[in-house]
Amino acid sequence: MTLLALGINHKTAPVALREKVAFTPDSLVEALASLRKVDGVDESVIVSTCNRTELYVNTQHESATALLEWLSNFHHVEVDEIANNSYVLAADDAVKHIMRVASGLDSLILGEPQILGQVKQAFGDAKHSGMINTEFDKLFQHTFSVAKRVRSETEIGANAVSVAYAAVQLAKHIFAELPKRSVLLVGAGETIELVAQHLKEQGVTCLAVANRTISRAEALAESLDASVYTLSQVPEHLKDFDIVISSTASQLPLIGKGMVEKALKQRRNMPMFLVDLAVPRDIEAQVNELGDAYLYTVDDLQHIVQKNLQNREQAALEAEKLIEKQAGNYMSWKQSQQSIDLVRQYRQKGMEQRDDVVEKALAQLTEGKDAETVLSEMAYKLTNTLLHPTTLALREAAMHDDPALSRWLGQALSLSDTTSDIKK
């Protein structure tokens, strides 16, 4: 059996193609059932996220042609379009790849943690569909263990590498008990949505969203159980928040020095942390002149992100070494399983040959033939039958002038060094 990985990701294909070959949760069950019918496929896992679609298959074939055709037919996409924007990895390269993917080393954002959960979900779906046997169970359980070690033994996930995440992590450093703090989000675009997601993960519950378009604010606030304000209401409520994070498309500042100064007085000079992720700025730079206001701009956060990204890249080098070693451990286990299978097959074949010779000998005895003659003939036939494959292997080694193989065979068969005799 050969392990094959066929994939399309953010590095090899545009989003338009990635969308075409993505699997929805509803289509995944059907896909796994369909993939089971592909000739030679024994085990399979389908990993499908916004940035990648990958098929991991244990198959009798060394070529991914059948997988390409299956993916093309299932999604009604031209084979050439998939082939020209995909990658195929086999054996140990495929093992290293799935470990890199689960560890976040192949992600759009280096070291992002969500992918491990997505791979686990994909494995669970495949197992539930009956597509997992011994080899894939071992491979994916080992992969999950490696991914956890990468996160615990390296700094791959220790530092923020997006401005949204950096903003929340900075707030966490300034306020020891972040979940108890009140947060005002100004804007309702993608950046604020990402900030809101990170805040929710940190356990923040006291949230409000202010936006020019109230319906957009309400849509975001619904998932957060947050209050909703218009931009004109921000001056009135600013005093109620410990943290203000803003990202709008406004061409002029929305929060000025005077507005923050008034809010600080109403807060009896309790500190306020403000993050301006907008370009042009939403918060006047002069706010930083106020003693209890701590203002960070997108440029400040970009410096943090850049430094953290460098740290992650260094951690990724350490993770690659760990994965290289652990992939080798898995391949050694797989090879040992193959040797066990060979031994089992060898013994099975020997016993079948023995039973066949004995059955014929018993038939001859029943017919009344001389017992000594029957036993002598049985021993002769059994010896020839069992030694024939080994004899052929010894002759083949000699004919190809391969003394190393001849010596190895001799040692394996507990013979003396008979290389020269074999050649004769």
Image (cartoon, rainbow, N blue to C red):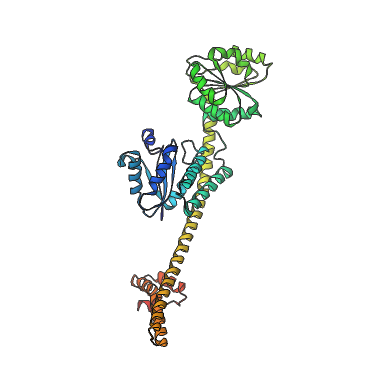
Residue 190: image x %, image y %?
48, 25
The answer to whether residue 70 is above or below residue 418 is above
Foreground residue, 165 or 119?
Answer: 119
- Residue 340 located left or right of residue 288: left
The answer to whether residue 149 is above or below residue 264 is below
Foreground residue, 376 or 192?
Answer: 376
Measuring 58% from the left and 13% from the top, which residue is drawn there?
235
Name the image quarter holding the N terminus: bottom left
Residue 312: image x %, image y %?
53, 38
Name the image quarter holding the C terminus: bottom left
* Residue 119 seen in render: yes
Tally the marks.
0
Residue furthest right as drawn:
268
Q: Quadrant of residue 27?
A: top left
The answer to whether residue 342 is above or below residue 120 is below
Residue 78: image x %, image y %?
30, 39
Residue 174: image x %, image y %?
64, 27
Foreground residue, 55 or 23?
Answer: 23
Measuring 40% from the left and 84% from the top, which residue is drawn there?
374
Q: Quadrant of residue 397?
A: bottom left
Foreground residue, 244 or 295?
Answer: 244
* Residue 187 seen in render: no
